[in-house]
């Protein structure tokens, strides 16, 4: 086996470990959500973009067309695709929010600013763009 073959094998092994790591962390991050087929979905956008205002890191990190917004009868879900979910959780973009914990929703030039309290009662703010702002606001009851 020459050096080039060894390098290719090492690269493949690293890629497999990375994909497995993203899969495992994503699966863990999304474990807070029930199967979407078990709830009544009022609004869903799989290609939203947004960021959390929790810190400078979350403001510049965010998600570009990798965020999913789901409005059900009782909750608002902010989540991501399986392989990106671990990263979006680090950027404070994985949330399951009962409607009663949403304190304010503002729309400004198509951008939604959402203020809510998380499970621990901490105030959080997420800013995002969705494909149909008016429909989202109707479904969320604002």
Image (spheres, rainbow, N blue to C red):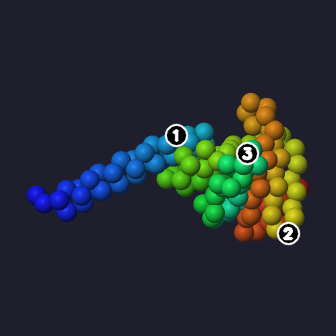
Q: Which residue, as the protein is rendered here, is positioned at the far left?
A: 1
Q: Is residue 133 above or below residue 19?
A: below
Give the quadrant of the C terminus: bottom right
Q: Are marks 1 and 2 in contact (CB under 8 Å)?
A: no
Q: Which of the pair 54/31 is nearer the observer?
A: 54
Up the image or down, 44 lies above or below 55; here it is below
Horizontal and vertical percent for residue 47? 63, 65
Question: Mark 2 — residue?
Answer: 109
Kindly report which numbered mark, 1 or 2, lies closer to the viewer in this rendering: 2
- The relative height of residue 101 versus residue 104 in the rendered view (above or below) is above
Task: Decide: few, some or many residues near mark 2? Use Cα within 10 Å; few <14, some 14-19, many ≥20.
Answer: few
> Quadrant of residue 103 in the image?
top right
Res 78 visible:
yes
Residue at left 79%, top 47%? 125
Q: Earlier in the sequence, mark 1 or mark 3?
A: 1
Query: SS at mark 2?
Result: loop
Among the two numbered marks 3 and 2 on one chain, the one whose residue lies closer to the N terminus: 3
Q: Are marks 3 and 2 in contact (CB under 8 Å)?
A: no
- How far across and how far down the image is residue 14, in percent? 33, 51
User: In the image, residue 102 lies at what x, y percent?
Assistant: 83, 44
Q: Is residue 38 visible?
A: no
Disc 1 from disc 2: Cα separation:
35 Å
In the rendered structure, the answer to whether residue 5 lies left or right of residue 45 reads: left
Q: Which residue is mark 3?
A: 55
């Amino acid at each position: 086996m020459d050096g080039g073959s060894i390098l290719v094998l090492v690269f493949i092994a690293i890629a497999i470990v990375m994909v497995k790591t993203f899969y495992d962390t994503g699966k863990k991050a999304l474990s807070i959500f029930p199967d979407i087929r078990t709830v009544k979905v009022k609004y869903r956008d799989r290609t939203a973009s947004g960021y959390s205002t929790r810190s400078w890191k979350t403001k510049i990190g965010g998600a570009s067309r990798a965020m999913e917004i789901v409005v059900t009868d009782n909750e608002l879900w902010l989540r991501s695709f399986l392989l990106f979910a671990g990263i979006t959780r680090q950027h404070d973009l994985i949330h399951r929010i009962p409607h009663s914990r949403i304190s304010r929703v503002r729309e400004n030039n198509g951008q939604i600013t959402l203020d809510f309290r998380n499970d621990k009662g901490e105030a959080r703010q997420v800013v995002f763009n969705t494909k149909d702002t008016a429909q989202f606001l109707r479904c969320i009851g604002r």
